[in-house]
Image: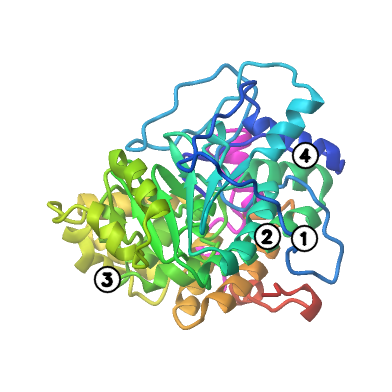
Amino acid sequence: MIKSGTLKLNCVAGNSINKLRYLSAQGSATGKDMVVKFDNHNPKPIILPPETMPSTPYPTPVVEIPGPIVEPTLPQSIPQPQPQPDSKPPTEIPMPNKTTITAKEVQQNVEDDVLFEDVGDKGVIILNRPKALNALNLSMVEKIYPVLKKWESSKRLVIIEGAGEKAFCAGGDVKSVVNTLRETGNNILVKTFFRKEYTLNYLIGRYKIPYVATIDGITMGGGAGLSVHGKYRIATEKTLFAMPETAIGLFPDVGGTFFLPRLKGKLGLYLGLTGDRLKGIDVVLAGIATHFIPSEKLPYLKQDLLTTEQSDVKEVLNKYQCIKFNQEFRLAPYMNKIDTYFSASSVEEIIQRLKEDNSEWAKNTLQMLLKASPTSLKVTMRAIQKGSTLNLSDCLKMEYRLACTALNRTSDFCEGVRALLIDKDQKPMWNPNSLREVTDAYVNQKFTKLLEEKELQL
């Protein structure tokens, strides 16, 4: 999952688990303690239950390998100003200006990358890596899953939100993933993240109690996986949503093949192939968020949700939502063209129809497509088409198979991340380098089932 423009994170080298945890922890090492304000002045401490993620037939190393989403990078440089959510996500997220950190600080950062508030019969999850735009890593996934499982039977409501003012969750750390693959060739640790992240996505999708995701700010890739499958998704004027994985040789995962084809018309296929971004109220009008609430009202909404005895969460949310949306969906003027052009039977035909249109919108759309990996375009189109008839579980299993095919040194995924995030030459050498060379047989091979014991178990 990428976030076009939000693609960056620090490198992970070698197989040392301690080293991996150290590097991952640096993403939130600011040298300052995070102050968390609780609405309940006597919050109960959370004790993680002994339950673990679903077992697998092979050992699962515990490391800080980030997810498949293209997210912020954490180079050690002088901090640069963060953009507002109404602009493109940063291509680089600087580390705090600190050259050394103690072992105690490393441990503290790892422990605090997710915070939990236990408020009576309600619970709050806070993604706590604001310096990294709350990018999701394995440590966070392994903390969130058991708490969600416990709360499902002990709480009446769960809220998930991101710390800071920039992002809900910009996604995962693909630069670290690719550096690990390039330097060691070992994809077992990376597969661990994918598998556990998809398992968490599935839990959210079938959660039995109300799950409210406040997607205030940048929400891409892994952030979509933590929100879109829940019952309630709250967008604000600062929300910036996208699934731009094709630009780095990947495909929309974390359940993207499930929710994208269920948007109106061919909008989901358009968003999945182009990586186009939606902002603010457009996220609701597209059908991705369920409510639009001004960010200034979020503290009051949270307080209301945590203190009310009212069982109808939707009724509480509706009190804060704007009565009327005085704005037309940004893509409304082009929906007829989107439905017509993206209903073509192949990516080549979509491109041909856009060329024949030759309007400014068609040229811009064509430009987004031509920058993407030819293989990613064809795989994404096939996956979204298949996903339209599958349930969430089967979509995630399909995505896991596809992800496994991308985890090698010669994949377009590695090349795309190299070109956009590592060498930054912006000139990926896709292989194959044209749509014509991406044959049906080549695409079909990527959808082949794994050995039973290696399949994603949900």
Q: Residue at x 76, y 48 (%)?
A: 181
**Which residue is located at x 36 percent, y 56 percent?**
308
Q: Earlier in the sequence, mark 3 or mark 4?
A: 4
Q: Nearer the viewer, residue 182 or 139?
A: 139
The x, y position of residue 50, in whole percent, is 77, 60
The vertical placement of 152 against 33, above or below, is below
Residue situated in front as seen by the camera: 286 or 437: 286
Vertical placement of residue 389 versus 272, above or below = below
Crowd around label 1: few <14 · some 14–19 · many ≥20 (10 Å): few
Dot 2 or dot 1, earlier in sequence: 1
> Toward the viewer: 204 or 402?
204
Residue 421: within the magenta?
A: yes
* Residue 190: image location, x then y, percent: 73, 54
Q: Which mark is residue 50?
A: 1
* Quadrant of the image containing the C terminus: bottom right
- Could you say where residue 446 lies in the image, as x and y percent from the top left? 65, 71
Helix, strand or loop status at disc 4: helix
In the image, residue 119 lies in the stretch drawn in magenta:
no
Badges 3 and 4: C-beta atoms under 8 Å apart?
no
Where are the magenta residues, as a range?
413-439
Is residue 78 at all visible to an observer of this figure? yes
- Say which amino acid is labelled 3: Asp
**Quadrant assignment, res 11:** top right
Q: Quadrant of residue 405?
A: bottom right
Q: How are the colours assigned in the image?
A: rainbow
Kind of residue at disc 1: Pro
Residue type highlighted by circle 4:
Arg
Query: Mark 3 or mark 2, which is nearer the start of the sequence?
Result: 2
Q: Which mark is residue 21?
A: 4
Residue designated by label 3: 339
Tell us which disc is closer to us: 4 or 1: 1
